[in-house]
């Protein structure tokens, strides 16, 4: 072996050792593809009564969620939630994540506490453990990887409910302060810190040309007083372009506003059960008014069932030249009920 070969061997050995150091040193405990979810060491020290087994199936533009254990969430008897996880302070989410169709990402950016970032690959299972924030309120999670034109709409909320009673004024103040710091410092313009707005018994929300409230997904987080009468006016601007997921194509290639969706108010109870308060078919250009008494700890508003979108003008969309279809949620948000 001549001198040149020795140098090459030494260099290759150095690179291999360096890769080994980097892999071992950066191996994240919160990200596992394959294996058994209970193998996550952090969960071995958690009371089983505080673990929410959270199964997520990621589809094109939507997260399908099922919960069991500490929380058994369901919507009108259906155990599958859309873009929503429900938990309580101090609990842990034992995440099992799969993909139904495309490569995606689960990103939970609670910058004040923790950031969870998991890759979702078709055919593989991703496991993770996520500590539920101690502050009650909504925390956004999203798809952090481009998988089509509507990928930025694939955002959901981890709704942290009090075990009993309502959101305290101090917890709401903490949320507002945290959001304010984020929006005025390193996260200026971050759409995932939705504004928190007091409803003051009545509020009007209007969608923009993209079919969302306040140019963000989810929309503004509203705050209502315990046992107060709340009126929410939702105005859906008539969609007229391909920039709006509510502007869809028929099988003959004719574009028109979507009609077969419902808008409503939905109560979220302490145990994770979601019930319909009021619901009706969508109407465009005129206020859709909903009035209710704030007795549940939280509510959802808007369109909480994904809208099927299929961009197929003149039937030209196919696997060869490309296609754009999936389930999209945009005009929705949460309402927190503040106690006395």
Image (cartoon, rainbow, N blue to C red):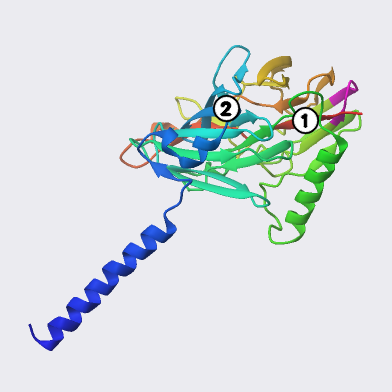
Using the numbered discs, state the Cα–Cα distance from disc 1 to disc 2 in whole angstroms: 17 Å
Tell which of 318 and 181 is nearer to you.
181
Image coordinates for residue 310, horizontal then vertical, percent: 48, 31
Q: Which circle marks residue 335 in the picture?
A: 1
Image coordinates for residue 335, horizontal then vertical, percent: 77, 30
Magenta residues, start to end: 224-231
Tell which of 178 and 135 is nearer to you.
135
Q: Is residue 73 left or right of residue 19?
A: right
Q: Is residue 142 above or below residue 257?
A: below
Q: In this view, does 91 lie to the left or right of 19?
A: right
Image coordinates for residue 50, horizontal then vertical, percent: 60, 29
Helix, strand or loop at mark 1:
strand
Quadrant assignment, res 184: bottom right
Give the number of callouts: 2
Question: Is residue 34 among the parts visible in the rendering?
Answer: yes
Question: Is residue 312 among the parts visible in the rendering?
Answer: no
Q: Quadrant of the N terminus?
A: bottom left
Q: Which circle marks residue 82 in the picture?
A: 2
Q: Quadrant of the C terminus?
A: top right
Tell which of 110 and 1 is nearer to you.
1
Quadrant assignment, res 196: top right
Q: Which residue is drawn at 77% across and 36% down?
A: 206
Q: Residues within 10 Å of mark 1 (few under 14, many from 20)?
A: many
């Amino acid at each position: 072996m001549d001198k040149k070969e020795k140098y090459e061997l030494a260099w290759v050995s150095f690179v291999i050792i360096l890769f080994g150091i980097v892999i071992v040193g950066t191996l994240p405990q919160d990200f596992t593809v394959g294996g058994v979810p209970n193998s996550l060491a952090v969960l071995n020290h958690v009371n089983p009564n505080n673990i929410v087994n959270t199964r997520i199936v990621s589809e094109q533009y939507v997260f399908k969620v099922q919960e069991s254990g500490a929380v058994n969430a369901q919507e009108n008897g259906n155990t599958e939630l859309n873009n929503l996880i429900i938990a309580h302070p101090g609990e842990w989410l034992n995440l099992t994540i799969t993909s139904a169709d495309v490569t995606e990402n689960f990103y939970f950016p609670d910058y004040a506490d923790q950031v969870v970032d998991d890759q979702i690959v078709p055919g593989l299972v991703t496991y993770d453990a996520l500590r539920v924030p101690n502050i009650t309120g909504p925390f956004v999670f999203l798809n952090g990887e481009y998988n089509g034109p509507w990928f930025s709409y694939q955002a959901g909320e981890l709704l942290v409910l009090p075990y009993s009673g309502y959101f305290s004024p101090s917890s709401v103040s903490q949320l507002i302060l945290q959001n304010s710091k984020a929006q005025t410092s390193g996260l200026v313009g971050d759409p995932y810190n939705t504004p928190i707005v007091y409803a003051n018994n009545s509020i009007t929300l209007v969608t923009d040309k993209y079919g969302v409230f306040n140019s963000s997904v989810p929309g503004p987080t509203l705050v209502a007083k315990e046992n107060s009468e709340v009126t929410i006016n939702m105005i859906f601007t008539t969609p007229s372009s391909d920039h709006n997921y509510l502007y869809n194509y028929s099988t003959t290639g004719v574009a028109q506003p979507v009609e077969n969706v419902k808008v409503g108010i939905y109560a979220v109870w302490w145990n994770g059960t979601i019930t319909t308060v009021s619901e009706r078919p969508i109407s465009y250009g005129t206020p859709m008014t909903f009035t209710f008494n704030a007795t549940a700890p939280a509510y959802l508003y808007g369109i909480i069932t994904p809208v099927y979108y299929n961009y197929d003008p003149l039937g030209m969309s196919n696997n060869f030249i490309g296609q754009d279809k999936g389930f999209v949620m945009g005009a929705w948000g949460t309402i927190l009920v503040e106690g006395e």
